[in-house]
Image (cartoon, grey):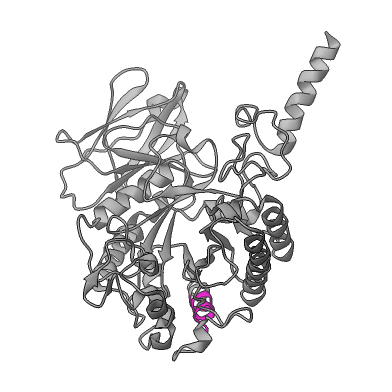
Amino acid sequence: MNKIVLFVAVYFLSFYALGQSPKENSRRSSINLKYGAHRLGKREDLDMKRWRAYGFGQFIHWGLYAIPGGEWKGKEYNGAAEWIRSWEGMPKSDYDSLYLKFNPVNFSPDSWAKMARKMGARYITFTTKHHDGFCLWPSKFSDYTISKTPYQKDIVKAVVDAYTREGIDVILYFSVMDWHHPGWRYELKTTEDSVAFEGFKQFTRNQLLELLQNYPKIKGFWFDGTWDKSWVRQARFADELEKEMRKVHPGLIIGSRFRADENGARHFDSNGDLMGDYEQGWERVLPNKIEDVHGNDWDAIMTVPENQWGYNKFWKGHLKTAFELIEMTAKSVSLGGNFVLNFGPQADGTIRVEEQKLAGEIGEWMEQNKEAIYDCEYAGLEKQDWGYFTKKRGSEKIYMIVCNVPLSRNLRIKLPEGKGFKNVRLISRPGQLLNSEKLNAKEYFIQLPQMEVKSPIVVEMELISKQNEGSFEKAKI
């Protein structure tokens, strides 16, 4: 019996040391992996806590692909604009010479950063190099860079400095896939392919370490273009490179796309454990319930049209409204993630009018309601049809982000056993307390006043112990 008690004590202490519960670890099986996940559970250092508290961010896709803008010689490309080089209607030689025309004379990084701050973005993910291989910084390891264009100036530095001045953290996007490099291969079929790819691997390492050296203020990397069979086979190399980058830049935040394990599993290793610091799998789609994210950190990146990242002249189909994007932000934060909205600047460096308008509308809402987004997390309450709950970290403060106001103006909520609430008010009317009605032991109605609704509204409250239920504060509206 004493042996059993000792075993149980050691078991739970081991999970405590890792900062997680047995339930969080229940997905891990017994497969012995050398290049799988190196940590179970979430990072709890200050850098990762800061990332986790962002709530809302901006993504910018910008490069040579902004020049054709989804069109070449009168023919329209139906794919995402930044993939136009892969289109048969775009001669490779024509695309590869676009750098000779890249001269964004109207590029104003300070204007970009100020727009992002007013929109409410807490961080930006910026493309240093997309799949075409063109570098927006003057890399020493390539001739295909901004320094060879008419513009010549270091765009990455300009972005990092401008956003940092505005208090916005910077994550650098980097595509491992590189169509321009002679050593890149989609698949390694021959000895010659393998030899060429070894050179490409060292090139990739050199560029990543160069970015860390050039821009020490950055907070992390957002990797892309890592699904090629050639890169998936580089588990050992990628694992060692990740460790090297973390040593050079302690606290560096790296998403789940960077590497595969020795069995070719990506994002999650062969045991089902997250590789990297947060999941990058939510692209143009959001989870629907907390179980979908498996207790991991995550962010979702979203486009305004269905699938256009870089600048495209032809925005077609449904274009998301500010209301929709605010709701997506609320949903993301309610499930413990960050929401990141993409922008695709034009070739001259200006941001299209439609995107500026959206940024302004989102910013107006964020200015009033940001406390329901920043430093908030999953509230642990059952979702209702009117919208989403978020919870301020380290407190009992709950926010109800109401996207669908019932005709009755009654918002149903269900509370955990032993919990009540107090100080219920609209963020927009902090001086007025809202009435509530008890339906049963766990359910209540929160009664909204008559009001015009043009965007999601936010109700705040504090959870309290049930024995204080009689002290609920009410006010006639």
Image position of 457 (left or right of 111): left
Q: In which quarter of the image is residue 347?
A: bottom left
Viewer-proximal residue among 230 and 320: 230
**Identity of the residue drawn at 51% across and 88% down:** 148
**Identity of the residue drawn at 39% across and 62% down:** 120
Q: Quadrant of the N terminus?
A: top right
Q: From this viewpoint, which residue is outermost toward the top?
A: 1
Is 292 rendered above or below residue 248? Answer: above
As for residue 112 lying within the magenta part, the answer is: no
Q: In which quarter of the image is residue 304?
A: bottom left
Q: From this viewpoint, which residue is outermost toward the right?
A: 2
Residue 328 coordinates in the image, percent (x, y):
34, 48
Is 157 rendered above or below residue 300? Answer: below
Q: Can residue 430 be seen in this view?
A: no
Image position of 217 (left or right of 132): right
As for residue 156 lying within the magenta part, the answer is: yes
**Identity of the residue drawn at 61% across and 52% down:** 259
Q: Is residue 9 visible?
A: yes
**Identity of the residue drawn at 31% across and 65% down:** 359
Q: In which quarter of the image is residue 306?
A: bottom left
Dominant SS in magenta: helix
Viewer-proximal residue among 373 and 452: 373
Q: Quadrant of the C terminus?
A: top left
Viewer-proximal residue among 410 and 401: 401
Is 5 rendered above or below residue 26? Answer: above
Residue 354 coordinates in the image, percent (x, y):
24, 68
Residue 205 coordinates in the image, percent (x, y):
67, 67
Span highlighted in magenta in the image: 154-162
Please give the count of numbered marks on the rendered protein. Answer: 0
Residue 156 coordinates in the image, percent (x, y):
52, 77
